[in-house]
Image (spheres, helix red, strand yellow):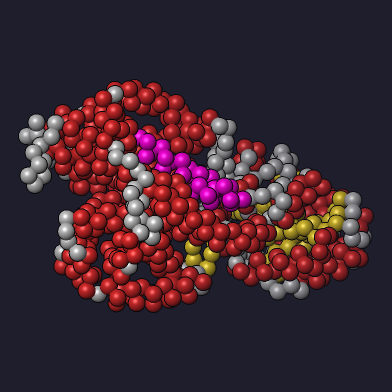
């Protein structure tokens, strides 16, 4: 009560401080760097990651792209190459003339060397940058290279993808938020009892979203997935807290209290209601921080603090706004469009065995679909983007004209004899799917002495400690063929140089596949344990955590099983995030209903203990309106983003969040009351304070 009275007294000061924080947060949000490279979140101890660091430190090479040039003769291409070399942050360019311009007769150069760079009127260059794959300098350099050749230059590779993805996200993100706001507003206007209060909710939640996004500045950077989803998720997940406060405030107003008297009571009630609810949601997001793949921590930290800010806003900013706007809010109230749920609740209780049978029948196919969906996720980030994007056009051209799907790099110690490296190269070239192996030994062949090569060539391919080989492959990223090829290449490499490293997008993607398979199991169990403990302490029950988690987990199985039966593949990150977010966000509905059931069962104030049927019915009747508003709010905030976005990684996550909200809502309304009826005796025996219930 003291905190609530302080909020009432300080309402104007709270609003002024909030406006100031929003202004500062906008500056922080603008200056927060966004990372578009999903491979940078791999654990630092991985060999592929260490190899990237060596490549940058030893060779000054970070990012790498294959540039296809069409319709230019040799002289024009050579001129273009010089222009590319002069682009800021281009470290070096390796093309045919890097070798052919020296005083070596062309006829003694290996045929494979010429064929690796040329095909008809198209030629390909290997362009190295002095920054990382997703650095701002590299992205800027990609744009300048594209401008040099207009429609005759095609830039492929990860950096080109990042450049295109950045442009697409910047174009779409504001629209994501706009769609989420409009649809959430529409849902609240339909389901709440005031035309004006949805706008007040959005002002309160929006201010906390700004503060959350602004404080991301202190994290250094966030991923584009986090930036795209955080505002939408925070809006959807924290809407409940505003609804709790509004309903509680109006209940106290009905009892005759004025606004300044009713609000401290409403704040007290809201804090009591949302503690367990918000902590379970935060726990779901915190579980993502246990992923080895640190994208989980990126999203988890941002969303966990977003929920915390949402709770804070619901008991400070929102009460202040409601009190300032109390008269127009009361004047614009109307009868809720949600009818009285007495008959619905009674009907569910009467036929509860039917819902138990339906639930039992759904479990096996749900689990089967869930397992199959997890086994059929895709890891090629490019596949989640539109086919007409520039980098995808370039990748397709590289594949069609050069039968080349990806280029990897091998680092071999410089003290390995050239004859040994040449022998290794021959074995590497014999690996199925390897198109060519290009390095110092490829340039020299067996007839050219190394001392006639210019330093500007040798420095690109060899340093004091390492020599660099380029391995071109006809296999696509994240395919079974490339996985087998990588294993064979690594086997050959390690047999000649135990310290040698295979690096590049394909090798990193294989590491990504391995680490996320483990992460999925870890995150699922961590989130379940966290939520179990929270429900245990909130409900003071040993049986309720099992019942609630089992219910929501089946909802997750159904949600993630549907893509398998519909023949859809999901991006790799989607099942991991959905399994925790849906658990944390929708277990709130279950806690709301079971807490009310427990209260009705034990009895409160002057109300006596009710029988199990009466208690479940009363709890269901009271909870359905809040569950509907919350569930449809989450659905509305995410379904519009799914419909609009052209980025499948974002769209699929929003689709599953929207569908998960409806599935969990239906399970809580129809199946949870049935489970409470079935296990009432067990709950009585295992829940503190319920043993003497009738």
Q: How many marks?
A: 0
Examine the rendered structure and indicate whether residue 140 appears above or below residue 287. Answer: below
Q: Which stretch is magenta? A: 638-667
Q: At which x and y percent is residue 114?
A: 86, 53
Q: At which x and y percent is residue 369?
A: 48, 30
If the image is split into quadrants, where does the C terminus sit? top left
If the image is split into quadrants, where does the N terminus sit? bottom left
Q: Residue at the spot x=45%, y=59% of the render?
A: 231
Examine the rendered structure and indicate whether residue 324 appears above or below residue 388. Answer: below
Question: Does the segment drawn in magenta span residue 163?
Answer: no
Residue 146 appears in the rendering: yes
Q: At which x and y percent is residue 485?
A: 65, 41
Q: Residue at the spot x=32%, y=54% of the render?
A: 243
Residue placed most toward the observer, 169 or 634: 634
Taking 658 as reference, is 399 left or right?
A: right
Question: Does the segment drawn in magenta span residue 663?
Answer: yes
Residue placed most toward the observer, 244 or 68: 244
């Amino acid at each position: 009560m003291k905190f609530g009275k302080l909020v009432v007294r300080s309402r104007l000061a709270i609003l002024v401080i909030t406006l100031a924080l929003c202004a500062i947060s906008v500056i922080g949000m603008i200056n927060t760097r966004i990372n578009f490279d999903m491979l940078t979140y791999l654990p630092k101890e991985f060999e592929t990651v260490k190899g990237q660091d060596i490549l940058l430190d030893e060779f000054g090479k970070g990012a790498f792209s294959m540039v296809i040039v069409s319709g230019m003769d040799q002289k024009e291409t050579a001129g273009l190459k010089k222009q590319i070399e002069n682009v800021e942050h281009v470290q070096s360019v390796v093309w045919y003339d890097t070798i052919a311009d020296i005083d070596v007769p062309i006829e003694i150069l290996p045929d494979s060397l010429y064929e690796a760079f040329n095909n008809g009127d198209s030629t390909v260059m290997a362009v190295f940058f002095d920054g990382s794959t997703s650095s701002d300098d590299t992205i800027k350099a990609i744009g300048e290279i594209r401008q040099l050749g207009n429609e005759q230059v095609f830039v492929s590779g990860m950096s080109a993808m990042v450049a295109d993805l950045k442009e697409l996200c910047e174009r779409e993100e504001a629209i994501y938020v706009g769609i989420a706001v409009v649809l959430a507003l529409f849902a609240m206007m339909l389901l709440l009892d005031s035309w004006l209060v949805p706008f007040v909710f959005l002002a309160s939640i929006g201010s906390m979203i700004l503060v959350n996004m602004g404080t991301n500045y202190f994290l250094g950077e966030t991923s584009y997935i986090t930036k795209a989803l955080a505002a939408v998720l925070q809006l959807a997940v924290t809407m409940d807290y505003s609804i709790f406060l509004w309903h509680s405030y109006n209940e106290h107003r009905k009892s005759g209290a004025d606004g300044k008297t009713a609000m401290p009571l409403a704040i007290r009630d809201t804090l009591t209601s949302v503690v367990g609810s918000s902590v379970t949601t935060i726990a779901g997001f915190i579980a993502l921080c246990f992923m080895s793949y640190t994208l989980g921590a990126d999203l988890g930290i941002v969303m966990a603090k977003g929920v915390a800010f949402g709770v804070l806003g619901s008991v400070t900013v929102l009460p202040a706004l409601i009190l300032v706007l109390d008269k127009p809010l009361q004047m614009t109230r109307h009868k809720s469009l949600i009818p009285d749920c007495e008959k619905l609740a009674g009907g569910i209780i009467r036929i509860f065995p039917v819902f138990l049978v339906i639930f039992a029948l759904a479990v096996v196919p749900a689990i089967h679909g869930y397992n199959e969906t997890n086994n059929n996720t895709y890891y090629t980030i490019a596949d989640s983007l539109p086919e007409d994007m520039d980098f995808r056009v370039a990748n397709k051209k590289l594949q069609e004209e050069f039968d080349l799907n990806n280029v990897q790099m091998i680092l071999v110690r410089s003290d390995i004899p050239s004859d040994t490296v040449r022998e290794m190269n021959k074995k590497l070239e014999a690996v199925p799917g390897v198109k060519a192996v290009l390095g110092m030994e490829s340039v020299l062949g067996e007839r050219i002495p190394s001392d006639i090569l210019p330093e500007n060539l040798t420095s690109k391919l060899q340093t004091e400690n390492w020599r660099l080989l380029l391995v071109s492959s006809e296999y696509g990223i994240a395919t079974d063929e490339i996985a087998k090829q990588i294993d064979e290449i690594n086997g050959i490499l390690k047999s000649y140089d135990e310290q040698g490293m295979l690096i590049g997008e394909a090798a990193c993607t294989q590491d990504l596949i391995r680490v996320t398979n483990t992460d999925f199991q870890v995150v699922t169990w961590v989130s379940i344990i966290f939520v179990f403990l929270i429900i245990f302490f909130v409900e003071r029950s040993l049986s309720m955590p099992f019942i609630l988690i089992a219910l929501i987990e089946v909802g997750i199985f159904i949600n993630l099983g549907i893509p398998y039966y519909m023949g859809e593949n999901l991006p790799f990150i989607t099942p991991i995030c959905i399994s925790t977010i849906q658990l944390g966000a929708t277990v709130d509905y279950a806690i709301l209903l079971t807490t009310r059931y427990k209260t009705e069962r034990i009895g409160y104030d002057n109300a006596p203990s009710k029988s199990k049927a009466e208690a479940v019915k009363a709890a269901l009747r009271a909870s359905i309106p809040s569950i509907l508003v919350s569930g449809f709010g989450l659905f509305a905030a995410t379904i519009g983003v799914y419909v609009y976005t052209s980025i499948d990684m974002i769209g699929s996550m929003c689709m599953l969040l929207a569908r998960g909200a409806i599935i969990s809502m239906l399970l809580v309304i129809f199946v949870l009351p049935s489970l409470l009826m079935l296990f009432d005796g067990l709950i009585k025996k295992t829940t503190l304070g319920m043993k003497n219930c009738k």
